[in-house]
Image (cartoon, grey):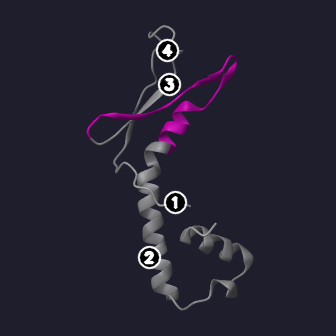
Amino acid sequence: MTRTQHTPGPLTIHGPSDGKMRGLDDGGDYAILDADGHIIGEAIRRVGPNEYAAAEANARLWAAAPRIADEHARMKAMLHEALGDTVDPRAFNPRVRALLAEIEGER
């Protein structure tokens, strides 16, 4: 897992689009906005000729990403505080080892 900088939150969503931009928008798309109101991404509803995605749910998940990342960091710090840096993750069961590996970005 790479550690790249992301757009800080809070992120919000705006939509659904009304489909009035002929040729560019079929309606139902959601914009993801940064704290200054700039569009940083878009969750598209129509993804194929007869295929549709859950654009609102995808946009909400995307907008929640900074909060999820912050909570992940907080939980990681709590885990290290509780277990210490000397705990060998191999001592845990496979599911806990996998979680620790994912938290540490080794997966």
* Along the viewing direction, whichever of 63 and 8 lies nearer the viewer: 8
Identity of the amino acid at label 1?
Thr
Task: For label 4, count other residues whose C-alpha is less than 10 Å away and answer few (under 14), some (14-19) or many (20+).
Answer: few
- Horizontal side of 95 relative to 12 (left or right) equals right
Task: For label 1, count other residues whose C-alpha is less than 10 Å away and answer few (under 14), some (14-19) or many (20+).
Answer: few
Question: What is the spatial separation of the Cα atoms under label 3 and label 2, in whole angstroms?
Answer: 37 Å
Question: What is the spatial separation of the Cα atoms under label 2 and label 1, in whole angstroms?
Answer: 19 Å
Eye-nearest disc, 1 or 3: 1
Q: Which residues are magenta?
A: 36-61
The residue pinned by badge 2 equals 77
Kindly identify the residue that appears in the image at 45 percent across and 48 percent down: 64
Identity of the amino acid at label 3?
Asp
The residue pinned by badge 1 equals 2
The disc, 2 or 4, on the residue closer to the chain's N-terminal end is: 4
Residue occupying the far left of the picture = 36
The residue pinned by badge 4 equals 24
- Horizontal side of 95 relative to 87 (left or right) equals right
User: Dividing the image into 4 quarters, which one contains the C terminus?
Assistant: bottom right
* Along the viewing direction, whichever of 43 and 107 lies nearer the viewer: 107
Question: What is the spatial separation of the Cα atoms under label 2 and label 4, in whole angstroms?
Answer: 44 Å
Question: What is the spatial separation of the Cα atoms under label 1 and label 4, in whole angstroms?
Answer: 33 Å
**Residue 87 at x, y = what percent?**
57, 90
Identity of the amino acid at label 2?
Ala
Relative to 43, say whether 73 is above or below.
below
Identity of the amino acid at label 4?
Leu
The secondary element bearing badge 3 is classed as: loop
- Horizontal side of 102 relative to 91 (left or right) equals left
The residue pinned by badge 3 equals 29
